[in-house]
């Protein structure tokens, strides 16, 4: 006859098996080149960018993020509405099985709103990424100065 665990042990044992399953999505995601764009002086918001690579065999969804530098964190994208680029909150960011989601300026990103203090180049921001199965992954993203826009090339002296 098989003995069952006493009721006092059954719940913690069940929780262990659930957390092992829940860790699956976060464990299959690799975060490449995360960074936070340094905000201009006086700005109360900025964004974090990265590449999320899914090494697992199932699609994943990033459904939330939290960070140490701002009071509000949202998942966002940019949309072209009638020729005007607008930022919009999204409920999730899809990461295809054995694929990737690229979070970049002008596209998907983690929006950091109501900054607690100004961020300086080289600071590190702790970001927790939350997935649709309840698992999460914590990363550190360095703060970087925005890259300057390349100056347009002068082609007036070229002979075509």
Image (cartoon, rainbow, N blue to C red):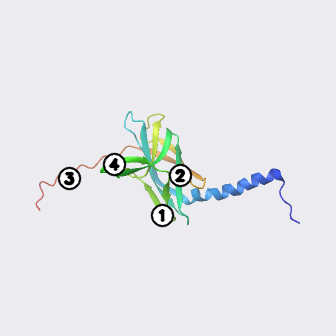
Q: Which residue is mark 3?
A: 153
Q: Estimate the x, y position of residue 118 in percent, counting from the top left.
A: 44, 35
Which badge, 2 or 1, is on the more N-terminal residue?
2
Distance in Å between CA atoms under marks 4 and 3 = 25 Å
Instruction: Rate crowding at label 3 as few (under 14), some (14 to 19) or many (20 or more) other CA atoms within 10 Å.
Output: few
Using residue 124 as the reference point, say whether residue 147 is left or right of it.
left
Q: Is residue 71 visible?
A: yes
Q: Residue furthest right?
A: 1
Distance in Å between CA atoms under marks 2 and 4 = 23 Å
Q: What residue lies at 39% left-to-right and 36% top-to-bottom?
A: 43
Q: What residue lies at 80% left-to-right and 52% top-to-bottom?
A: 9
Which badge, 4 or 1, is on the more N-terminal residue?
4
For the residue labelled by badge 4, is the local secondary structure a helix, a strand or a loop?
A: strand
Asked if 54 appears above or below 105 in the picture, the reply is: below
Distance in Å between CA atoms under marks 2 and 1 = 17 Å
> Count of labels shown?
4
Which of labels 3 and 1 is toward the front? Answer: 1
Q: Which residue is mark 1?
A: 99
Q: Which numbered marker is on residue 85? A: 4
Instruction: Tell me if label 4 and label 3 are in contact, CB under 8 Å.
Output: no
Instruction: Rate crowding at label 2 as few (under 14), some (14 to 19) or many (20 or more) other CA atoms within 10 Å.
Output: some
For the residue labelled by badge 3, is the local secondary structure a helix, a strand or a loop?
A: loop
Q: Residue furthest front?
A: 82
Asked if 160 appears above or below 91 in the picture, the reply is: below
Instruction: Tell me if label 3 and label 1 are in contact, CB under 8 Å.
Output: no
Which badge, 4 or 3, is on the more N-terminal residue?
4
In the foreground, 73 or 141: 73
Which of labels 3 and 2 is toward the front? Answer: 2
For the residue labelled by badge 1, is the local secondary structure a helix, a strand or a loop?
A: loop
Q: What residue lies at 46% left-to-right and 39% top-to-bottom?
A: 113
């Amino acid at each position: 006859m098989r003995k069952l665990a006493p009721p006092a042990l059954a719940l913690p044992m069940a929780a262990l098996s659930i957390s092992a399953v829940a860790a699956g999505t976060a464990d299959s995601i690799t975060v490449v080149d995360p960074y936070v764009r340094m905000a201009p002086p006086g700005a109360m918001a900025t964004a974090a960018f990265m590449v999320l690579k899914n090494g697992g065999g199932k699609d994943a969804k990033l459904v939330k993020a939290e960070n140490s530098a701002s009071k509000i964190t949202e998942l966002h994208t940019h949309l072209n509405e009638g020729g005007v680029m607008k930022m919009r909150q999204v409920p999730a960011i899809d990461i295809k099985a054995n694929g990737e989601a690229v979070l970049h300026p002008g596209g998907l990103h983690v929006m950091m709103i109501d900054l607690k203090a100004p961020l300086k180049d080289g600071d590190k921001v702790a970001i927790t990424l939350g997935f649709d199965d309840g698992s999460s992954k914590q990363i550190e993203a360095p703060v970087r100065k925005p890259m300057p826009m390349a100056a347009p090339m002068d082609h007036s002296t070229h002979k075509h």
